[in-house]
Amino acid sequence: MRKALFISLLRQDVAFYDANRTGQLVNRLTADVQEFKSSFKLIISQGLRSSTQAAGCIVSLYLLSPKLTGLLLLVMPTLVGAGALVGSFLRSLSRRAQEQVAKATGVADEVLGNVRTVRAFAMEDQQAGLYCAEAERSSQLSQRLGLGIAAFQGLSNLALNGIVLGTIFVGGSLMAGNELSPGDLMSFLVASQTVQRSMANISILFGQVVRGLSAGARVLEFMTLEPKVPLRGGASIPSHSLLGHIAFNHVSFSYPTRPGHPVLRDFSLSLPPGKTVAIVGPSGGGKSTVAALLERFYEPTQGSITLDGHDISSLDPSWLRGQVIGFISQVGGAGGTGHMSGGCRSWRSGPSRAHRTPCFLAPPSWRTSASGSRAPPTRRCTRPRASPTPTTSSAASLRATAPSWVSGGAGWAARRAAGSGGTQHLPGSPAGERGTALSGGQRQRIAIARALLKDPAVLVLDEATSALDAEAERVVQAALERAARGRTVLVIAHRLSTVRAAHLIVVLQGGRVAEVGGAGGGVKGGARGGARRGRGFRRGHLGTRGAEGSSGGQGAGLCGKGAGLGTKQGRDWWRALRGWGRGRGLGKRGRGL
Ligand SMILES: Nc1ncnc2c1ncn2[C@@H]1O[C@H](COP(=O)(O)OP(=O)(O)OP(=O)(O)O)[C@@H](O)[C@H]1O
């Protein structure tokens, strides 16, 4: 059950995780499964014994005196009906009690998982109070449940003893009328006491069964839950024809947990193949949401997203995430971004590169072949393993194994990204839970290296270098720019240094494209191109035109003079970015970066 539940949890939509706390899910995986298991065991051992004993004795009761047994059976349905009524009340109480335990576990998980923040804000007492309040509520519910079960057991015992008394009374009168021998009455009483003992056992078991059933229901609820976006299934584009052209077509979106709060409204954007498109805009404007939709973490409420003209909802999500898109999120990479998955891939054409075979995950060093020799580092059958959360050993292995065959400089970039910033000085030391023993920058570099190792056709960089200092950012940025060559790149950025290399810059505000401008594909283009072409890209002029204008360093509006974004709003953005550069002493127009 644990395995099935865990696998089912892993398959769920990201929205599911927005709605359910990790602690609560872990509680289902541990406490609820355990509760179900214990009840199951008790039902099988004691339950089976008591019920067969009761059934056997009822048969002998019938053989001894059908009349007396008939009277007994008349009373039983009333008792069973009353028991079932109380039982359903107790089950719902038990469910609430278990949910409350899960809630308390959720609070504990969140507090302990963020103990540094709690310490930094001196919130220990407040958090302890929060947990105690939840635990107290859980304790009250458990007490009510305990009282309910005790009352049920007491009443059922009273009823069963009442039945024995009733049997003696009715049996006595039958004996007086010579309808029953004294020996048979004695046997009847012994058998009915056995029935009573068995029933009492069953009623004690009932409390456990109630808890077990509600725990089982909670486990089954998530075990049978089907995600809206399945992990696998759907079409994939042959590697030789994959270009990496992404288009958002009139996409509107609200997060499922906030259906009344639209984040994207009629958002359209085209990412031409092989070009870098940067999205800038105010915080909360929906930039990261664009990346999340591209990864199919969520489904658009309206509109569609296409890859080379294919709606991504018709494509295999695991192929899309595992082989096409390399995603580096702003969380600092600690949350398992830039994931690796099995399967060799190549998205560029060419006899060897077009080859696509399933392959094994290799150990940190190259997989050893059956003959004991090391398998050659060819692209086809070996893949370096990167753990889902960064560990220092994964940093070391990424540096060691980032293969030269990873195209477009990605292998080099991965080695550069993982190898800078002190990760090389931490051989074999533990990275801590969620990588807390690493610095934010180190985590981010490992996440970048991990994503680049996938050699993705589309690279999504959501504030990918935000946790790095200026020097590390320069190294990693250079690595990323090199890795970006020939790939479609979506950059979400606040920093000028990150945006500089983009061919197209999009200002996203209030969930809409407020402006689009060509940046000239880098500083050089920017310096040369001037503003004239860039001025053409105003609201609504999206996609290929923008890309054409900005390719080859011609549409250099933004980097050249800051006028690529033709409206005041765009120029404000440019000034803000430039101001940032100056403020950090990094030179006018960020050239010092
Ligand atoms: N998982 C979520 N569930 C509900 N609302 C969310 C979720 N993630 C983001 N939001 C909301 O969606 C809006 C857009 O968030 P998003 O992270 O896309 O902004 P952003 O432009 O990337 O911001 P920033 O520049 O600060 O990273 C915000 O109002 C945010 O509160």
Image (cartoon, rainbow, N blue to C red):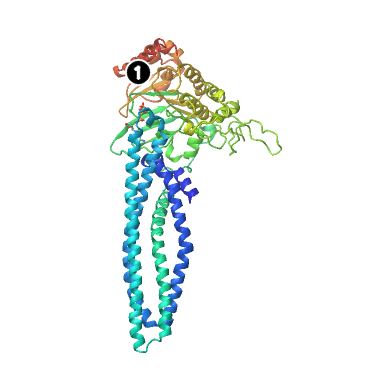
Q: Is residue 301 visible?
A: no
Identify the residue at horizontal 35%, vertical 18% (top origin).
Answer: 536
Viewer-closest of 381 and 95: 95
Identified at 32% across, 74% down, the residue is: 75
Identify which residue, 367 or 480, lies in the foreground: 367
Counting from the top left corner in percent of width and height, residue 481 is at 49, 20
Instruction: Please identify the quarter of the rendering in which residue 116 is found.
Output: top left
Q: Does the residue labelled 1 lie within 8 Å of ligand 1?
A: no
Q: Is residue 126 above or below residue 26?
A: above
Q: What residue is disc 1 on?
A: 536
Identify the secondary structure beneath mark 1.
Answer: helix
Q: Position of residue 30 (x, y in %)?
A: 45, 47
177 in relation to 40, above or below = below
| Amino acid type, callout 1 | Gly
Quadrant assignment, res 50: bottom left
Return the x and y of residue 193 as percentages of the image width and height.
41, 74
- Which residue is at the far bottom? 178
Task: Count up the numbered dots.
Answer: 1
